[in-house]
Image (cartoon, rainbow, N blue to C red):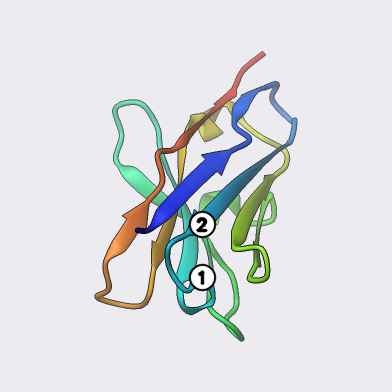
Amino acid sequence: QVQLVESGGGLVQPGGSLKLSCAASGFTFSNYVMSWYRQAPGKERVFVASAGTIGGSPAYSDFVQDRFTILRNNAENTVTLKMHSLKPEDTAVYYCSARQGPGGTRYWGQGTQVTVSS
């Protein structure tokens, strides 16, 4: 059974940093593209970043470019999202996602709340 468990969310001041983590189990982690999405109140869930399978390059949405870094650890079945220079508009529930490839089933974690506010 696929399980994705996020952690690390919280309240941070503008300009601050947070690190989100996602622990995965129940599937062959190295064969799946791991991604982070976010959903702000009243808005659709949108792509944030992804880390491809072995040899793949990470991808980022334009609104987080150079501020966020996604890292996967295939030995520990984890994927992290390091976030710097956070802005109030980064406030959202952040979701970890796994998918084996185009057209494959996308799995979701339960989400972790990130609030950027002074």
The image shows residue 92 at horizontal and vertical percentages of 46, 32
Q: Residue at x 47, y 71 (%)?
A: 33
Q: Residue at x 27, y 73 (%)?
A: 104
Q: Residue at x 74, y 30 (%)?
A: 15
What secondary structure is marked by label 1? Answer: helix
- Is 102 left or right of 70, judged from the image as shown? left
Question: Disc 1 or 2, which lies upstream in sequence?
Answer: 2
Q: Amino acid at mark 2?
A: Ala
The image shows residue 29 at horizontal and vertical percentages of 51, 70
Classify 27 as above or below 9. Answer: below
Q: Is residue 16 visible?
A: yes
Classify 98 as above or below 18. Answer: below
Q: Amino acid at mark 1?
A: Phe
Callout 2: few (<14), some (14-19), or many (20+) C-alpha neighbours within 10 Å?
Answer: many
Q: Residue at x 56, y 50 (%)?
A: 22
For the residues labelled 1 and 2, the Cα–Cα distance comes to 7 Å
Instruction: Tell me the quarter of the picture where residue 39 sits.
Output: top left
Is residue 82 or residue 118 the one in the foreground? 82
For residue 24, which numbered disc appears in the image?
Answer: 2
The image shows residue 56 at horizontal and vertical percentages of 57, 81
Cβ atoms under marks 1 and 2 closer than 8 Å? yes
Is residue 22 or residue 95 the one in the foreground? 22
Q: Quadrant of the N terminus?
A: bottom left
Q: What residue is pinned by disc 1? A: 29
- Is 115 left or right of 68, judged from the image as shown? left
